Image (cartoon, rainbow, N blue to C red):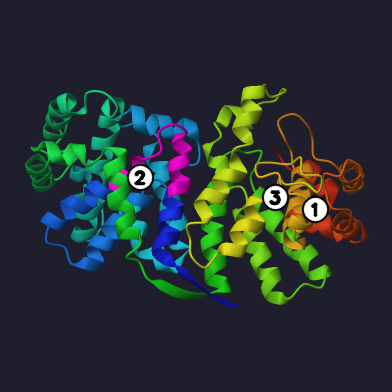
Amino acid sequence: MSVTINLGQAIHALSDALDLVGVDEVFHGKRVGFMALQCGRDLDLCEPELEDLFHAGLLHDCGVSSTHVHRCLIDKIDWEDVELHCVKGSELLGQFSPLAPLKNIVRYHHTHWDAFPRLDIPRNTARLANLIYLVDRVDALAIPHYESDLLLARHTIRDTIWRLSGSCFAPDLVALFMDLSGNEAFWLSLEPRHLIRSIYERKWESQMVPVTFPELKQLALLFARVVDAKSPYTMEHSLGTARLARFLAERAGLAIETCEKIEVAGLLHDLGKLQVPDEILDKPGTLTREERAMIQRHSFETYQILHRIAGLEDITIWAAYHHETPDGRGYPFHRRGADLTIEMRIIAVSDVFQALAQHRPYRKPLSPNEILEMLESFVRQNHLDSEVVALAGRHLQASWQAATGVESFDELSRQPR
């Protein structure tokens, strides 16, 4: 299978997903990318270098899934475990070949300038990584002031960056930043209404490119691994849902291209959960009404992220409708009956099946027979499709293995939580 997508839009969609981790603070990656681009232009970088720098800024925190880690990155200039997300982000980008050139910039975007001489890193890579670090810390310092007194606070921010010249940041990059940030326009352009216009004007200049299914799956896996890393209780959920969805699609006799797209949709279905605070996903007790409402946002956020990528229209709908139900009482769109295609119904059943097969903070994983009993009860309540559940029941052990990636329930039970 080959599809044609807008790669620039896909990168921006990944940036949108990463920004959700901030919950209420959703423009960090975009501001870092925008500031890096402004500085890069004054460094006389060529257009491909500018594009890499801009994308590295958008994606620099792709190793961050946890709202707790995001708070630390925003609240502190530096902290002990800061390098962990740099390593993880670099590994993720390295697995998708079009983004692999960014991996070393992301890997070293919290490395102090005075540490680079001890590292075997090309000087140009070190400078670009250090520039991302500089504007990243500028944004962290500015976040408390965006809605109130940014123009007043800019003096303190500039003084802080100046004091870190030669230690955290390259002196010439600090000098460049001081020159650019001396005018009010630099700071005012970071306000959301101006920032969004600038960012999305650049996005729509991106080109449509053909990608093979393995390449598309690589991209989807990058998204999925960011989501699944959010909580130990959801580890492997996207991967398991995707495997089971493809397995059921194949058993249903769907075309091979459809089966491949269903697998991608399964990988992407929970993107919106990045906005759910860690403490809600990991809560061992009953959720409050407010907490449940927060979780019910996630499939709408999945739709908002994916529908901006030209070429993924059907995959977007299949992924975003995974909590819709035949009786129309699902969420967030309340589609029902004939509005729910077989692809949507397969992903909905796969999502529930895989979740029941995993540890959760409030219960142990269920056995294959227990899962089937639960699925059949959901069918009786008109919450899941009867034909898809029956299909899973006819291939129960194989469905369970696809959902969990292990051979037996005893093996899963022995795994550490």
Give x and y (percent) for residue 44: 11, 61
Residue 52 lies in quadrant:
bottom left
Of 168 and 310, nearer the camera is: 310
In the image, 231 versus 292, the foreground residue is 292
Q: Quadrant of residue 50?
A: bottom left
Q: Which residue is mark 3?
A: 322
Residue 93 horizontal side relative to residue 382, left or right: left
Residue 184 on image: x %, y %? 12, 36
Residue 287 lies in quadrant: top right
The mark that comes first in sequence, 1 or 2, is: 2
Q: Amino acid at mark 2?
A: Gly
In the image, is residue 71 part of the stretch drawn in magenta?
Answer: no
| Vertical placement of residue 102 versus 323, above or below | below
Contact between labelled residues 3 and 1, with CB atoms less than 8 Å apart: no
Task: Count residues near mark 1 (Cα–Cα under 10 Å), then give few for <14, some for 14-19, many for 20+.
Answer: few
Residue at the spot x=34%, y=27% of the render? Answer: 75
Helix, strand, or loop for circle 3? loop
Residue 249 placed where, x, y %? 77, 66
Q: Does residue 26 show up magenta in the picture? A: yes
The tag on residue 337 is 1
For the N terminus, which image quadrant? bottom right
Per the model, the C-alpha gap separating discs 3 and 2 is: 28 Å
The residue stretch that appears in magenta: 16-33
Residue type beneath disc 1: Gly
Q: Amino acid at mark 3?
A: His
Mark in front: 1 vs 3: 1
Measure how far apart labels 1 and 2 are at the Cα level.
40 Å
Q: CA distance from mark 1 to mark 3?
A: 14 Å
On the picture, is 102 further left or further right than 283? left
Residue holding disc 2? 29
